[in-house]
DNA sequence: CGAGAAATTGAGTCAAATCAAAGACTGTGG
DNA sequence: CCACAGTCTTTGATTTGACTCAATTTCTCG
């Protein structure tokens, strides 16, 4: 896992890990044989709240957001997805989705149908572990996110969000210091529960303080230490750290 | 399920359901044979963040809170538990808990060890469904909670919290209109991400408006319609409603 | 009964929302 | 290839809901 990191990400290992990024990535090699792959474009929905639960999806490439809709029709983004993530885990409760998932860019997924899931749960120990771990991991991330939403200042929220993304990309073998924000500022604001103007102001502030550099969708983290110093919630951290270093990756992408 | 409702809860069926309260309750009848039961007192911890994951627990009686701890040692309550709830689902990710669970009153739990879980996942279709549903349900609730924390005013948060509790008690065959708050105001404030003074002020305001009556820990909801009108986030609602009325309870307490 | 904890209430302050407007970017059609 | 329309983003001015600080009051429990 570590071996696939780019060397430019090395500095990351010194900074505390923010979120629990050790989510199991499910391996295509043996799971996608015979499973359907599908390509989606930006703004396409994978499924919507209320849709029948067909099965779980593995995001193969691209990115997506999950959101729920309130009584009065307002949407709230609950999660962003990157390659290797499992989508649709909310469907087990009532055999229908409570959330919607929409793609942020051209993306591909692979479907594991409910019947396949049921079968694999019995026959495949690794699959069972991957599912449980993924759900458990999501629960932990949700808790950390709730704490962040409850107690963090806007600046801390944005800092945490960026560190989160950075580590997430790093884990996928991409640059931790420079990446593309596939979501809009509006998405970020919505996700973090703040006004879009506030997000913009904090980006500007971080830029003035030479912590980051932003050019449209391209974000560069210049001063990791400073950004990390803004972050107060890194729950799941120890677990993730201990975890990812001690256990072998169960199933990884690529 | 409905048949066990107290008649005084009938008015509830008219008000929209707030949270997804159809979480599967795991049945003691066949699962607790040979499983260890334990009694805990108020302020006891069932487990703490970092503890080894022994297995999942079913809360038999009493109530508990789950919380996580931030970098600087601050605690944040992420969930309250009532009889029938599964505790410790956060342990699957790294075989250790990322959260702590503490009891709010004298309570009893029953442990299903990890090895029993592994075995039951393979052999017991109902158990497998119950676990997946419980985790999936928690994910849905977390999403709704995140949206609430992000977008609701303090008054809406408190209103939603009370409706949530009301429905939760109702589902357990207890009064939906009058119940005991086993958590302190501080706990409520912490959970909802607001100052304790604000909680107190909103309780007072609701009381002045004859929406609720509070006497220490005893809370009475007088005007369900008015309280419900304050609530804006009832995500999971339809699912829960459709769900609980259409499907037979998989496994219930009592 | 008394000490400490929990809860309420009031007054003042501030972080972030809202309101407002300009500037930059994206994509489409001529 | 450029111009225009619409979206996205930034920046400034103002407002406000909720926090903090402070002071009681009420409750809990040894």
Image (tube, coloured by chain):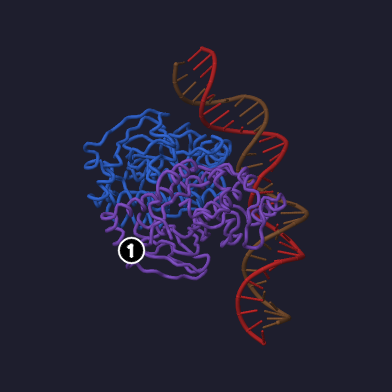
Chain colours: A purple, B blue, C red, D brown
**Between B241 and A62, which is closer to the camera in this rendering?**
A62
Q: Position of residue A217 (x, y in %)?
A: 62, 62
The chain holding disc 1 is A
- Disc tally is 1
Q: Residue at x 29, y 57 (%)?
A: A120
- Characterize the local packing of mark 1: few (<14), some (14-19) or many (20 or more) Cα atoms within 10 angstroms: some
Q: Is residue A251 left or right of residue A214?
A: left
**Between B138 and A19, which is closer to the camera in this rendering?**
A19
Q: Position of residue A226 (x, y in %)?
A: 65, 45
Q: Which residue is mark 1?
A: A113
Q: Is residue A192 in view from this perspective?
A: no
Q: Is residue B147 in view from this perspective?
A: yes
Element under disc 1? strand
Vertical order, B225 against B109 (above or below): below
Q: Position of residue B32 (x, y in %)?
A: 24, 39
Vertical order, B141 against A29 (above or below): above
Q: Position of residue B131 (x, y in %)?
A: 32, 48
């Amino acid at each position: 896992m570590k071996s696939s990191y780019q060397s430019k990400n090395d500095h990351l290992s010194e900074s505390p890990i923010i979120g629990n990024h050790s989510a199991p990535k499910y391996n295509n090699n043996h799971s996608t044989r015979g499973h359907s792959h599908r390509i989606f474009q930006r703004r396409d929905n994978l499924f919507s709240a209320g849709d029948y639960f067909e099965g779980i999806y593995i995001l193969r490439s691209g990115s997506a957001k999950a959101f729920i809709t309130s009584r009065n029709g307002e949407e709230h983004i609950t999660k962003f997805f990157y390659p290797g993530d499992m989508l649709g885990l909310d469907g087990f409760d009532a055999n229908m989705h409570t959330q919607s998932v929409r793609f942020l860019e051209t993306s591909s997924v692979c479907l594991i149908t409910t019947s396949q899931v049921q079968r694999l749960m019995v026959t495949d120990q690794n699959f069972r572990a991957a599912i449980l771990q993924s759900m458990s991991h999501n629960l932990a991330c949700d808790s950390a996110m709730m704490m962040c939403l409850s107690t963090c200042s806007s600046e801390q929220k944005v800092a945490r969000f960026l560190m989160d993304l950075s580590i997430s990309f790093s884990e996928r073998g991409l640059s931790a210091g420079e990446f593309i924000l596939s979501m809009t500022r509006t998405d970020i604001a919505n996700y973090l529960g703040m006004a879009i103007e506030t997000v913009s102001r904090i980006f500007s502030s971080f830029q003035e303080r030479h912590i980051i550099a932003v050019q449209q969708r391209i974000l560069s983290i210049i001063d990791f230490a400073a950004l990390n110093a803004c972050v107060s919630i890194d729950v799941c951290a120890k677990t993730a750290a201990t975890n990812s270093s001690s256990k072998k990756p169960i199933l990884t992408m690529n």
